Image (cartoon, grey):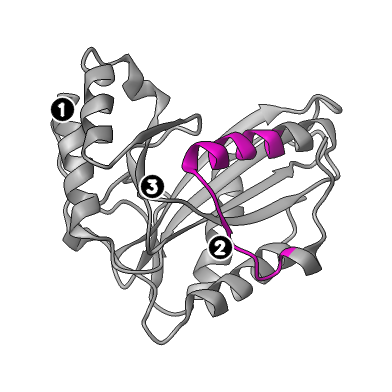
Amino acid sequence: MLDAWDRTETLTKIDFLDAGEALARELDLLEDVSQNPSHRHVWLWESPQCLVSPKSLSTKATFADSVEEMKANGWPINLRSTGGDVTPQGAGIMNITHVYATKPGQAVDLKREYDKLCTPIEQTLGDGTSRGWQPGAFCDGEYNVQLNGLKFAGTAMRIRRGKADKTQSAVLAHAIMLIEPVSLNAIEAINQFLTLLGEDRQINIAAHASLPSEISKLTFAQKLETTFWEIPVQ
């Protein structure tokens, strides 16, 4: 069983691990909070180059062959359980995973839970942020965090009823953030995978923003993690 993390030890740490391992670790953290609702985790991580796909796409008739072709082209596919759409991982991309329990007896409200994920990112970025759909962006959604009208962060969530207290829910909230401009190779890989699956949509590199050049990744990570901890979840 995982113990609650010591904030002083993880303040500036960004783990680097295989995306499959990261996705498994997210589920471990979700299980921990489900059994121990007083625990809370804020985890920053990065991964080698790959694509992450929702499990819903694995039902496509061409999925297995598509995975093999993408792997041969240097883009292995990992499946996640939080929904959404295909996203890239690799250089210039940082993830934050926030896992916590809702207030006892309180019904789950998706907007409220997404506020807890998006607001710290928006506050850390500062001026120029907004939230909403961004046509042409990968994994487009209502709760994109935008910077100057372009997508900076994509968000996803998984909610599980608590095991220790069934009046609480364990929430796994995740955001993928573009610290550097998303690469053309990543966009082309996503579009190739979608085409192989027979999906009638394409991603446009021009729909995306990145961290302003005057802000370092480490400075952003430090402020972001601190901001997450400062916002109450119950």
What is the chief secondary structure element of the magenta stretch?
helix
Q: Secondary structure at mark 3?
A: loop
Please check the rendered image and state whether residue 14 is part of the magenta-colored stretch, yes or no: yes
CA gap between label 3 and label 2 equals 14 Å
Q: Which sits in the foreground, 77 or 149?
A: 77
- Nearest to the eye among marks 2 and 1: give it: 1
Q: Which residue is mark 2?
A: 119
Please check the rendered image and state whether residue 37 is part of the magenta-colored stretch, yes or no: no
Relative vertical location of residue 169 with respect to residue 140 in this rendering, above or below: above
Q: Which residue is mark 3?
A: 142
Give residue 68's position: percent from left, percent from top.
Answer: 26, 25
**Whether label 3 touches label 1, CB < 8 Å:** no
Q: Residue at x 17, y 62 (%)?
A: 206
Are there few (<14), some (14-19), or many (20+) residues within 10 Å of tag 3? few
Mark 3 belongs to which amino acid?
Answer: Glu
Identify the image quadrant of residue 151: bottom left
